[in-house]
């Protein structure tokens, strides 16, 4: 067995990253690759003596307080980006780790990886938030499949219900962790990075904790970007992004299920605490309002729905192209085709955007709306700003407890049941019906001096090879970053 992680998870040039490796073999090597427009080999180590580290039975909570195997000073010439660390021992076993190099210089945009969500789904060494855990350590390895997949399109979760027996066997044969379908670099963020850098965008990179830790992280960029499955946010993360937009910054949420749950970072970012629908277990819970309660952002006790930041909420969306959820067309029905995001697409009202690539999946965010003058208009009931422009919609469905998939904890509560109880006032059939049939919603709105674009789905990155999905994305990034259309 070999396993490893890097700490800290992000660093600036000339700062130090430590590689921690456990192996039962005599020796190991590592190779560091920057993954972007191309795969660039950065460092290849010599043979290093293996260390059989102590693995605590509580490592999912306490982390892996291992002896560092190697220390690396970030070369000032290394580009900001995602650095993949491949570990291989003398027994032929392999594992992987990562770190991010942040930028000192101004970039077109800052792309913040959803590492808090990766951590929430991490089952290495013990339970995740989905299998009975409430406190999880970021200082430990990630299971196989989170950082690399041979065929991400084949094994994406939005195609799960159409998997053949061969697809399922291939997934198992690769040794992928089941939860790696729902979180990790390999599913969405890598695809966006390859497309964005190939398209000429000069990105800075960071991780979730950086948004929480560094109040000036967004001070010198015009655009913040979120991609894929970005579910878990702390109060300071939200403060950073919302204050940035209020001051005139732009935000592009190319993600879904975004900021549905609140978490708290603790112990110098070594741990993350979240209680989801078991909020009464939170030491901060006393039945009164609490801005940092580790539960649903839309809960009345927090009263800060994520729709105030993104324009949309998972509580009004749900699942799509998943078991027990609608397929729809796989894309968005177009509204207001004369809006600037659709320039150059030729799309007309009622056309479908991204259907062939199934961009609408697997988790989606929406808003309460009503049809006025033959177009959907937000009611504002869920916290969505009234000036939010709904530009695309698709059907979605929140799961009840019994509709969920996977080996979840016995105390798991379906999002539909929780939304009905906490937002609707009671978990009854009548209230569940009100929230059951939601929508994925794509749109824009102004916030303070800034502006926000949201796609309302996790799987947008899978559509970037589609001409119109790519065109819409470029329209947004170019406008928000102040770039010309040739980028």
Image (cartoon, helix red, strand yellow):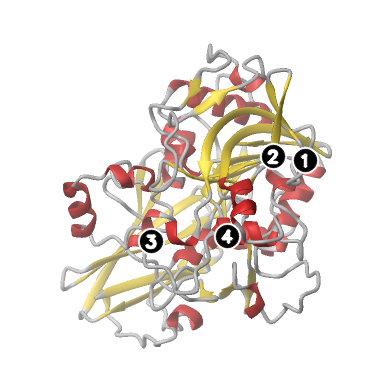
Q: Secondary structure at mark 4?
A: helix
- Figure label count: 4
* Mark 3 or 4: the one toward you: 4
Residue assigned mark 3: 179
Q: Residue at x 67, y 19 (%)?
A: 339
Real-space Cα separation, disc 2 to disc 4, in angstroms: 18 Å
* Mark 3 or 2: the one toward you: 2
Q: Are marks 2 and 1 in contact (CB under 8 Å)?
A: yes
Q: Nearer the viewer, residue 213 or 329?
A: 329
Badge 2 or badge 1: first in the primary sequence: 2
Residue 105 in the image: state x and y as whole percent: 64, 46
Could you classify mark 4 by the number of other residues whose Cα lies within 10 Å: few (under 14), some (14-19), or many (20 or more)?
many
Real-space Cα separation, disc 3 to disc 4, in angstroms: 22 Å
Residue 135 in the image: state x and y as whole percent: 55, 77
Q: Nearer the viewer, residue 153 or 204?
A: 153
- Residue 437 located left or right of residue 185: right
- Residue 132 located left or right of residue 483: left
Q: Nearer the viewer, residue 45 or 403?
A: 403
Could you classify mark 3 by the number of other residues whose Cα lies within 10 Å: few (under 14), some (14-19), or many (20 or more)?
many
Could you classify mark 1 by the number of other residues whose Cα lies within 10 Å: few (under 14), some (14-19), or many (20 or more)?
some
Real-space Cα separation, disc 1 to disc 3, in angstroms: 34 Å
Q: Quadrant of the N terminus?
A: bottom left
Residue 92 in the image: state x and y as whole percent: 16, 68
Q: Are marks 1 and 4 in contact (CB under 8 Å)?
A: no
Residue assigned mark 1: 380
Q: Secondary structure at mark 1?
A: loop
In the picture shown, does residue 342 fall above or below 392?
Answer: above
Badge 2 or badge 4: first in the primary sequence: 2
Badge 1 or badge 3: first in the primary sequence: 3
Residue assigned mark 4: 417
Q: Residue at x 40, y 47 (%)?
A: 35
- Residue 261 located left or right of residue 323: right
């Amino acid at each position: 067995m070999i396993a490893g992680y890097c700490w800290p998870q992000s660093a600036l040039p000339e700062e130090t990253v430590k590689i921690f490796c456990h192996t039962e073999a005599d020796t190991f090597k590592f190779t560091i690759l920057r993954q972007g427009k191309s795969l660039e080999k950065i460092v290849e180590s010599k043979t290093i003596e293996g260390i059989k580290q102590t693995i605590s039975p509580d490592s999912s909570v306490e982390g892996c307080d291992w002896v560092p195997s190697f220390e690396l000073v970030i070369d000032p010439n290394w580009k900001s980006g995602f650095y993949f660390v491949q570990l291989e021992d003398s027994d032929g076993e392999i594992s992987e780790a990562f770190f991010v190099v942040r930028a000192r210089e101004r970039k077109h945009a800052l792309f913040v990886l959803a590492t808090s969500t990766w951590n929430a789904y991490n089952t290495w060494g013990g339970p995740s938030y989905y299998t009975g855990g409430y406190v999880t350590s970021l200082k430990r390895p990630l299971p196989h499949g989170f950082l690399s997949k041979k065929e991400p399109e084949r094994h994406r979760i939005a195609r799960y219900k159409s998997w053949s027996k061969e697809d399922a066997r291939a997934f198992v044969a690769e040794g992928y962790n089941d939860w790696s379908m729902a979180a990790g670099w390999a599913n969405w963020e890598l695809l966006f990075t390859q497309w964005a850098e190939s398209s000429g965008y000069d990105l800075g990179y960071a991780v979730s904790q950086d948004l929480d830790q560094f109040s000036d992280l967004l001070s010198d960029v015009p655009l913040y970007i979120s991609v894929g499955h970005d579910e878990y946010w702390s109060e300071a993360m939200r403060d950073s992004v919302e204050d940035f937009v209020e001051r005139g910054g732009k935000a592009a949420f190319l993600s879904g299920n975004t900021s549905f749950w609140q978490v708290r970072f603790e112990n110098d970012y070594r741990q993350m605490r979240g209680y989801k629908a078991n909020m009464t277990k939170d030491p901060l819970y006393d039945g009164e309002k609490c801005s940092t309660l580790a539960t649903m952002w839309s809960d009345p006790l927090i009263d800060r729905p994520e729709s105030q930041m993104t324009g949309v909420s998972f509580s009004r969306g749900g699942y799509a192209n998943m078991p027990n959820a609608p397929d729809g067309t796989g894309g968005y029905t177009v509204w207001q085709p004369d809006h600037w995001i659709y320039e150059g697409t030729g799309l007309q009202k009622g056309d479908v955007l991204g259907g062939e690539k199934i961009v609408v999946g697997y988790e989606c965010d929406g808003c309460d709306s009503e049809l006025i003058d033959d177009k959907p208009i937000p009611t504002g009931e869920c916290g969505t700003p009234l000036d939010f422009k709904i530009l695309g919609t698709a059907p979605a469905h929140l799961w009840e407890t019994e509709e969920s998939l996977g080996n979840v904890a016995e105390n798991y509560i379906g999002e539909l049941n929780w939304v009905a109880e906490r937002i609707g006032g009671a978990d009854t059939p009548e209230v569940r019906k009100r929230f059951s049939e939601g929508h994925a919603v794509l749109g824009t709105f102004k916030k303070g001096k800034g502006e926000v674009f949201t796609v309302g789905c996790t799987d947008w990155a899978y559509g970037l090879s589609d001409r119109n999905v790519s065109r819409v994305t470029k329209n947004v990034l170019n406008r928000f970053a102040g770039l010309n259309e040739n980028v």
